[in-house]
Image: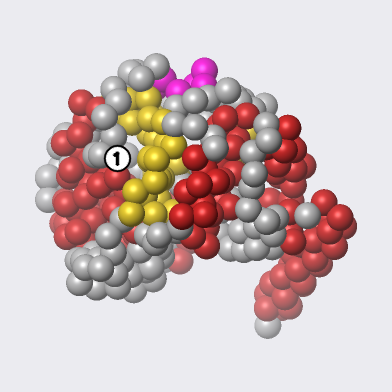
Amino acid sequence: MDLSFSTISEAKLGWGVTLLIASLRRAGLQNRVEIFSTDEAPELERSLAQFGNVKMHLLDTSKDPRNPCLRKPETLLALETEYIGWFDNDCMIIGDIGKYYMPLNGEFQIRMRGLEENAWVFERYYEPGEKRGPTPQKILKDWQADVGERTEPRVLTKCLANSFILHRKHRAFLEHWQRQNDKIFPKERSVGVVDRNRPAYFMTDESVLSSILAFANEIPPISEYRFDKDPKNYVAHFALRPKPWERWQWRLWKYYDEVQSVLRWCEEQKIVLPPLPPSFQRRKKLLYGLMSFSENKARFVARKVRGRK
């Protein structure tokens, strides 16, 4: 399959993109990966070059102070293969997902949230008495006004934009996504990966993409997302903070041994990695496991206390 991937990174997130590419190569997946970095990182570039078929580009941020997630479509448009794919730099491959690369319809695979998950995402945005599950009406109203094409939503839930694959014939769709990112979040305004000042677009690029999937006239046909169906071969996403290379969230602790497996594979392949962060050092496993469990327990107790007030 003629497929390449893009991702965006920066020096401080180097361990994320390292795990992503190392886990791809461990699975025998040699797809080209184009990394768009927001800063110069020559040591990271030399380290990643050891995996082969990797190229790093400098993403000019001098006139664009926004979080680079808003430039995902721009990086995807730089890919030249028949199929083009995206991974967030905090994704890691578990097992071998190669057999799930091809969208079942040959067009586009991306994960759409289920109704229960969608209700959790939009929990604070529902009006009293409004049905939970579908995207709230006030969010849909803003999306429709901004996209300005369909009057009724094509989809009722948000997508997830951490990993997806589509055919290059849908480049016009990516161009539309980039234009809409620039419309909703102008380049002159600094914005992070989350923007609570814009309820309809608080998840920035992902919210914009969801608005287009719902209300644009022309989008790629969406097929089933297959990177989460096989319990032995899937894409893990280290969402939220802290990241595992900083400190372990308890819900991500289940991936500790997988990370160690990737690191051991790198050792066996004589790949020289950057110095391991403390949270990846095997002799500190117990310490970080206890820290992760204790922090999770403390948050649970704090929520219970707040609930009684």
Q: Quadrant of the C terminus?
A: bottom right
Residue 32 in the image, given as x and y percentages of width and height:
41, 31
Q: Disc 1 designates what residue?
A: 76
Residue sitting at the far bottom: 309
Where 203 falls versus 216 (above or below)?
below
Front residue of this view, candidates 269 and 149: 269
Q: What residue type is labelled 1?
A: Leu
Where 179 falls versus 220 (above or below)?
below
Q: Quadrant of residue 281?
A: bottom right
Residue sitting at the far left: 149
Residue at 29% from the left image edge and 45% from the top image edge: 75
Residue 91 in the image, given as x and y percentages of width and height:
54, 44
Q: In which quarter of the image is the N terminus?
A: top left
- Viewed as shown, does residue 218 lie left or right of 161? left
Q: Which colour scheme is used?
A: secondary structure
Residue 249 part of the magenta segment: no
User: Would you call the spot at circle 1 few (<14 residues within 10 Å), some (14-19), or many (20 or more)?
Assistant: many
Where 98 falls versus 23 (above or below)?
above
Q: Is residue 185 visible?
A: yes
Q: Is residue 69 visible?
A: no
Magenta residues, start to end: 98-103
